Image: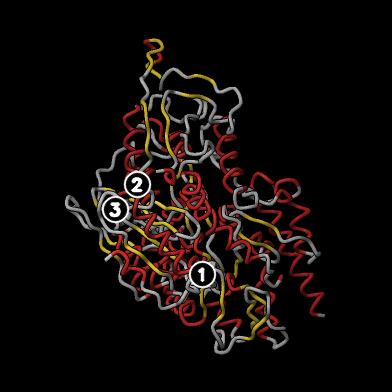
Amino acid sequence: MRMKKLLATAITMAALPLAAQAQAACQDDERLYAMADFAEAQHNGAAEPLRLTADTYLHLTPKAREVIGDNLSLLDADCNAMQVMDGEPPIKIEMPFPVLYNAFEDAVLRGDERTSGIVLRGFRAQPMDSASFLGLFTLVSKDPTLVQNLSSGAGISPHASIGRKCSEPVSYLYFADFFVRFGGQVEGNNGKAWFTSGSQTEVTSVEDNLTHSFPRLGNDCHVSKESVLSSAESAGSIAIDMGNSRTDQWGHNGGTMVNEAYAGWVEAGAPDDAQPQSLFD
Amino acid sequence: MHNTLAKWGATALLSAAVATQAHANDLVKMPFSDTPMTSEQQQAWNYYLADESAQYGCQYGDDPRLKEDPRGTLEALANGEEIEPVQVTLRTFLDASDNIQALLQRNMFVASMECNTVYYFDGEMIGHPVLPFEEYLDILLSKLGQEGSIRAHLDFLRGTKIAAIDARWFWAFYLMDEDHFRMHGHDYETIGGLAASLPGDLEEITPANSYWQIYSKLFNRGIYVANTNECNGESAEPNEATIIDDNLPWETVADFYQTEGVQYRGKWKATIKQEEEGFTLADTTLIEEPINPYFNVQRRVTIYPKECN
């Protein structure tokens, strides 16, 4: 159990940058190494369309966007080329979440609203399995200014910390919140994924039997169970609050009840509209 | 005709570039060059750069061709020869003369610690390079030397990030008393002043925390603890020859760990060596087969990776 907990965290910690690199295996046009030559050819009307990965396309500077214009083929996650219109993809393109998040954060950092808007309008996060999604319950940042800028850029409200001794409440966001904002859906083995949390500061992916500790905010402030479960639900999963009694936890009675409910749900054909929360009312 | 002119232009560019900056030492700026750091300390930092970037699948630094054969590489660029794109660190690029920059831009990309490809076009970067703290700070201080207002350098601040670093590398190189700032070629007035000028929570700025405040207030990829022991804790620490301030009190490191959310167990006890030598960190026990050759001693302190909390 302990190892599974660690594994889930390790996967997440490593996944963001590495997955972004995987997309880069789909290569950019080599002319990017000598952009001045391309700009000159473009000026002379002699440039073939520039082929860009989504990662590079989402890091173009306003000046580069202006020079390239629509003479650009965008490579999707499968390396299929797509012509842009008015500088943007004509339909939503599905990309791995890390590519979109990194591009969005970088655009917000440099105050590039055009690009952050393109991420939201022109792209959608690829579906993610339940074990990987569990790792997205990690804070995007502890820097309050960055959290504020990211939330206003994405048009989502940050969560507020809880805690009786929390004298200076903290606003926070999970990577999971951005996955939801980018239209991502979590997938379970039987359709919907199940997540549960109870009296312990942890969330569990039921079918994977994987548990992830809540991130820490410090100064006696804590993230709330509700913020985790609501994000999980918004990502299309079934989210179950086991309750707050001592035994309402994954390693105790709560886990046994959730597992039984999950088995019953699978036996019933995994209906999309199931309300297993009623088991705990 | 166009090609002839282009070749002429390139030849002139190359001649001018070579005349102003042809030696490898001129072209490539190494970490901590022009500082009194020992060669062991410089090697240790190079190990950090190699180790950190290898985790993302590349080797950070300037293209070896720029060190081994700068003239040949520049000639190849000037002649438009088909060569692999040249990896250039941002500092090397910015320190280069205009002519060298013009040649490099014929086939280059900017190095990044996270191995993301960063292109360069017309004074701007396409992509965000992730830079080691040492290089980031060097570039920023150089820019502030030209124009003192931090606001004048927002493009740099917003367009780059500081690389992640293991907590032990950080305290070994960047926690120190005022006397040791000279090891970085800096003084406390400059570094403390920079820390104070950056927006963010205003904690009391001290010599011990001023580098750390700069790192924390700028966009960074975080301070972590490498997990080499399946969450059983890491007791390997930097050896004395690597540490910049070998009189560093345990309390300073403990405060750093605490604020960074690094859980720890144990403490050092400063060891008095000889009266004239002052005291040193603590008695150390050598680790026989260290994972990191520069973290090869133990001082009865164990720290835990954040993900193991």
- Front disc: 2 or 1: 1
Disc 2 vs disc 1: Cβ atoms closer than 8 Å? Answer: no
Q: Residue flagged by tag 3: what amino acid is it?
A: Ser
Residue B285 image position (x, y, % from top left): 50, 19
Q: Which residue is mark 1?
A: A187
Q: Share a chain, discs 3 and 2? A: no
Residue A160 image position (x, y, % from top left): 25, 63
Disc 1 crowd, CA 10 A, few/some/many (<14, 14-19, 20+): some
Q: Is residue B112 above or below residue A46?
A: above
Q: Which quadrant of the view contains residue A238?
A: bottom left
Task: Tell me which residue sits at (32%, 66%) in the image.
Answer: A279
Q: Residue flagged by tag 1: what amino acid is it?
A: Glu
Q: Which chain is home to disc 3? A: A
Q: Which residue is mark 3?
A: A199
Q: Earlier in the sequence, mark 1 or mark 3?
A: 1
Q: Which chain is home to disc 2? A: B
Callout 3 secondary element: loop
Q: Share a chain, discs 1 and 3? A: yes
Disc 3 vs disc 2: Cβ atoms closer than 8 Å? Answer: no
In depth, the one of A273 and A166 nearer the eye is: A273
- Front disc: 3 or 2: 3
Disc 1 vs disc 3: Cβ atoms closer than 8 Å? Answer: no
**Residue B213 badge:** 2
Task: Tell me which residue sits at (50%, 56%) in the image.
Answer: A12
Q: Residue flagged by tag 2: what amino acid is it?
A: Gln
**Residue A154 badge:** none
